[in-house]
Amino acid sequence: GDSVTQMEGPVTLSEEAFLTINCTYTATGYPSLFWYVQYPGEGLQLLLKATKADDKGSNKGFEATYRKETTSFHLEKGSVQVSDSAVYFCALVGQAGTALIFGKGTTLSVSS
Amino acid sequence: DTEVTQTPKHLVMGMTNKKSLKCEQHMGHRAMYWYKQKAKKPPELMFVYSYEKLSINESVPSRFSPECPNSSLLNLHLHALQPEDSALYLCASSQEGSSSYNSPLHFGNGTRLTVT
């Protein structure tokens, strides 16, 4: 079945460092891909999405490109801030429109 | 501010209690969801309502009983819970009848449930 694999955390960075969180997926056809973020004590917020190959989703300085050839959707940000400290979930919806499938989540901790 | 409102934010209940979690959205979304999230884990889907009808029940124990009184409201009735049911319960909604790339999920901030 469809699945999402994220890099293990926690990821600890200094402010203004470059961030990459790896995400790969297994799915038939052309799933839609998402990154959700969960700040402490809150629910999940949609960070960005991509619906077809080579699409780039972007929001709040974060970017991720849908790579069909490597089945990847890595999250990047050029300069992280303390306020970016959160748990990041990669997720997909299969082409048949099935329920959202989450990766295990990656905790990001940014220090000043 | 989230557009999906959940109440209460925190709930402590004994194993013999009956309580309800409430969720409300006014975005005109036609699908609503209950998820359970344990600490440091991704959310696990429990129930999906599509156009006010239960469309998915992920083999959830009967001590959890969902209800969708109308397209804006979703309840989760709790009875005879176990300590292992302690978790963050998240409500979500989406525009269409199923989660899709045209209809991402909007989550509430959740109810932190503790069963004693």
Image (cartoon, coloured by chain):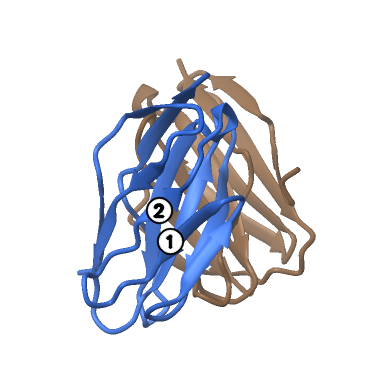
Q: Tag 1, which secondary structure? A: strand
Q: How many marks?
A: 2
Q: Is residue A53 above or below residue B29?
A: below
Which residue is at the front of the view, A98 or A54?
A54
Task: Name the tint of chain A in the rendering.
Answer: blue
Mark 1 Cα shell of 10 Å, populated few (<14), some (14-19), many (≥20): many
Mark 1 chain: A
The label on residue B8 is none
> Residue tagged by mark 1?
A64
Position in image of residue B106 (x %, y %):
62, 56
Q: Nearer the viewer, residue A28 or B7?
A: A28
Q: Is residue B90 left or right of residue B87?
A: right
Q: Is residue B34 toward the left or the right of residue B3 in the image?
A: left
Residue B31 rendering spot, x and y as whole percentages: 60, 68
Q: Residue furthest top?
A: B116
Quadrant for the C terminus of chain B in the image: top left
The chain under label 2 reads A
Residue B105 image offset from top left, x and y in percent: 56, 61
The answer to whether mark 2 and mark 1 are in CB contact below 8 A is yes
Residue holding disc 2: A75
> Which image quarter: residue B95?
bottom right
Kindly indicate which chain is depicted in brown in the rendered structure: B
- Compared with A9, A61 (above or below) is below
**Residue found at x 47% / y 70%:** A56
Say which element carries label 2: strand
**Residue found 45% across the figure and 76% down from its top:** A55
Q: Amino acid at mark 2?
A: Leu
Residue A84 place in picture, x, y as percent: 54, 35
Give the amino acid at mark 1. Answer: Ala
